[in-house]
Image (cartoon, rainbow, N blue to C red):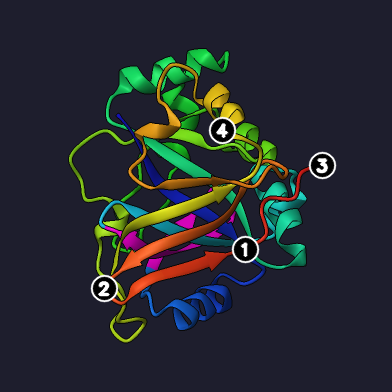
Amino acid sequence: MIHFDHVCMASPNVYESTFRLSQETGLGNYDGGFFPMYGIGHRVIPLAPDIYIEVESVIDQRPVRQGQPLAVFMDRQAREGDCFLGWCLRSDTLDELEAFAAHHGTTVDPNTTGKTFGRQMMDGSRGFALQAPSATVAWPMGKPNLYFKPGDGPHAASLPVVPGSGSVVGQGLAWIEIGESQSAFQAWLGNVASPSDFPFEIRYNGGTPGLYGLGVLTDKGVVEIRKPPVRIG
């Protein structure tokens, strides 16, 4: 089965943007570490035990100067402020991920999407997830990519937030707003999933592809989060 997993929010300053989003929503956050290959800092705002927003910004300009594609893409997108850079789905099985990869004419390569490129947590652990298509293919198109996370480790959204960073508890999604149409989303999903499979409302605004907003179910009611979608072109 396919699930909504997380949103990547690009920001000029990962700390200020995370603090501001927590202040606006009441949702807490914690330090998610960094991505050594990309020079990207990372903080996590859980929206449910298995859904989260990752707030990221380039904190080391060396990969940008070296032309690393993801670092260059994020740096360029964040120059005008926060945006929903990418949105990510999660599969229950590797077979589902491979079927999605085949639908998009690619393969699952653990050498380029696995541990080497994962995020480094401050407790010494390392994130590990396989994905297809890659973020540098799907996100600039405003499309979600699909993740599969092997093993039985804790989900990033299930880890505790920093005390005092927010007291509102996320309980899932009430709705998401995306561009284009239902038929366009179905075409992207192929035979792996259907928009009706997701346990929340999907609102289509007919605009350019990308994620525009989230309605988050919380213990204090529905919290709406909106950011500009990825800037295409």
Residue 182: give its label: 4
Q: Secondary structure at mark 1?
A: loop
Foreground: 161 or 178?
178
Discs 2, 1 touching: Cβ within 8 Å: no
Residue 233: give its label: 3
Residue at position x 45%, y 61% from top? 215
Which marked residue is nearer to the observer: mark 4 or mark 2? Answer: 4
Residue at position x 58%, y 64% from top? 226
Report if residue 158 lies within the magenta region.
Answer: no
Among the two numbered marks 1 and 3 on one chain, the one whose residue lies closer to the N terminus: 1
Neighbor class of circle 4 (other Cα within 10 Å; few <14, some 14-19, many 20+) is some
Q: Secondary structure at mark 3?
A: loop
x%, y% of residue 167? 30, 81
Whether 184 is drawn above or below 51: the answer is: above
Residue at position x 49%, y 51% from top? 176
Mark 4 residue type: Gln
